[in-house]
Image (cartoon, rainbow, N blue to C red):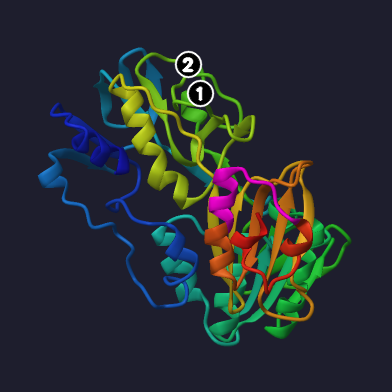
């Protein structure tokens, strides 16, 4: 949808066809695991006038294949002069014959919400962003909640075991049974069969162990694939006239000197501007500071940057207060990434510092009473 809007905003007056395999108009996903699951919202449809945009919106139509200038769909072929691939990602599921829920679509969210009734035994597999938010909603609904996580701490993949460990007390405070270093063997009727031979009974099983780029339909197309659709800094694919955006795009970052594939709303919001400029023959570079947020157990977490290879510096004491931050610094003390917990001002100032590339005074940085902007 953002790509269609960007096309019109840049003066394109040709035909635009928007194909999507869901039965709903385009909607925002972040509220699904937050406001929708908590019962505060029933719909997150984005307010966009497709008639005014003159967009041919085709719902419940899936992409099946791609050749030069032709898109194969479940309703036949579509010829194109330019194509935006924005097929996103699909949740990974566990093996087993028992029912398991995932949280990716509005239908997933509404169905899961209906299942979160007082007294229900809920097993959440994965203590990542989605798992923590689902556990938060389930506990608030009055469910008995068990969260099982293969790693030694929550959020280990996203943030590191050291940082994730600071969130462990939140689970106990919420009355949630958190089991770390625990592997699921299979999802069976009535619960989880664990690798150690134990059994976790559950009325509802929610699997939140990550996603895979939805790009299998591009096999054999000639479009280069590697952890998604491989694109350059302009979001161009290896096929002429084709760009890719969002969860499925593995793009080159000048800023961090590596490929990134970011599975968050901020990417879906801003990347289309660059992709459409490229598609229309303009020169544009996509090189943002990745950003995302999470609301869990009464805390607002925000993250900006990319911390691989950087050293960790605490800003405040996570064990002593509810407001703290973690900074990751490069060898020359430049801010590579920041995670804030209930410190939104630090996040805003941190993004600006990452953008500017200034070196920081580490001693001042460690003092949460010193504004982050005054640490440069």
Instruction: Point out which mark residue 289 bears.
Output: none
Depicted 13 relative to depicted 200: above or below? above
State which tag comes first along the sequence, 1 or 2: 1
Name the residue: 73% across, 42% down.
308
Q: Is residue 356 magenta?
A: yes
Name the residue: 56% across, 44% down.
356
Residue 284 x, y percent position in the rendering: 39, 27
In-front residue for pair 370/72:
370
Q: Please provide the residue range marked out in magenta.
A: 350-361
In-front residue for pair 95/254:
254
Query: Is residue 280 shown to the viewer in this render?
Result: yes
Helix, strand or loop at disc 2? loop
**Disc 2 residue crowd, few under 14, some 14–19, many 20+, Cα 10 Å:** some
User: In the picture provided, is 131 more to the left or to the right than 115?
Assistant: right
Residue 213 x, y percent position in the rendering: 54, 38
Depicted 181 relative to depicted 86: above or below? below
In-front residue for pair 362/219:
362
User: In the picture provided, is 275 more to the left or to the right than 231?
Assistant: left
Name the residue: 54% across, 55% down.
292
- In the picture, the quarter occupied by the N terminus is top left
Residue 260 x, y percent position in the rendering: 59, 36
Helix, strand or loop at disc 1? loop
Instruction: Point out which mark residue 238 bears.
Output: 2
Instruction: Point out which mark residue 232 bears.
Output: 1
């Amino acid at each position: 949808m953002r790509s269609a809007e960007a096309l019109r905003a840049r003066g394109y007056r040709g035909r635009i066809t928007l194909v999507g395999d869901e039965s709903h108009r385009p909607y925002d996903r972040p509220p699904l695991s937050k406001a929708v699951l908590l019962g505060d919202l029933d719909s997150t449809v984005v307010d966009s006038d497709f008639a005014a945009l003159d967009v041919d919106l085709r719902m419940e139509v899936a992409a099946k294949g791609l050749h030069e200038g032709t898109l194969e769909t479940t309703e036949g072929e579509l010829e194109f002069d330019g194509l935006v691939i924005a097929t996103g990602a699909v949740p990974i599921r566990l093996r087993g014959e028992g029912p398991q829920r995932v949280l990716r679509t509005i239908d997933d969210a509404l169905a899961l919400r209906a299942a979160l009734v007082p007294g229900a035994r809920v097993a959440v597999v994965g203590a990542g962003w989605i798992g923590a938010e689902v556990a938060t909603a389930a506990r608030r609904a009055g469910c008995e909640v068990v969260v099982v996580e293969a790693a030694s701490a929550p959020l280990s993949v996203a943030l590191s075991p050291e940082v994730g460990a600071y969130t462990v007390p939140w689970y106990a405070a919420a009355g949630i049974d958190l089991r770390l270093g625990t592997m699921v063997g299979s999802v069976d009727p009535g619960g989880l069969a664990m690798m150690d031979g134990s059994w976790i009974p559950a009325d509802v099983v929610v699997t939140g162990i990550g996603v895979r780029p939805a790009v299998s339909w591009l096999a054999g197309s000639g479009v280069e694939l590697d952890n998604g659709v491989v694109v350059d800094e302009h979001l161009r694919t290896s096929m002429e006239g084709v760009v890719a955006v969002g969860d499925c795009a593995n793009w080159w970052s000048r800023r961090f000197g590596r490929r990134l594939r970011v599975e968050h709303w901020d990417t879906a919001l801003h990347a289309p501007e660059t992709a459409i400029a490229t598609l229309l023959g303009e020169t544009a570079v996509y090189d943002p500071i990745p950003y995302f947020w999470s609301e869990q157990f009464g805390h607002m977490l925000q993250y900006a940057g990319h911390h691989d290879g950087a050293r960790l510096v605490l800003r405040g004491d996570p064990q002593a207060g509810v407001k703290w931050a973690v900074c990751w610094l490069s060898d020359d003390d430049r801010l590579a990434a920041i995670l804030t917990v209930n410190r939104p001002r630090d996040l805003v100032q941190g993004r600006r510092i990452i953008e500017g590339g200034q070196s920081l005074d580490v001693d001042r940085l460690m003092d949460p009473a010193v504004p982050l902007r005054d640490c440069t």
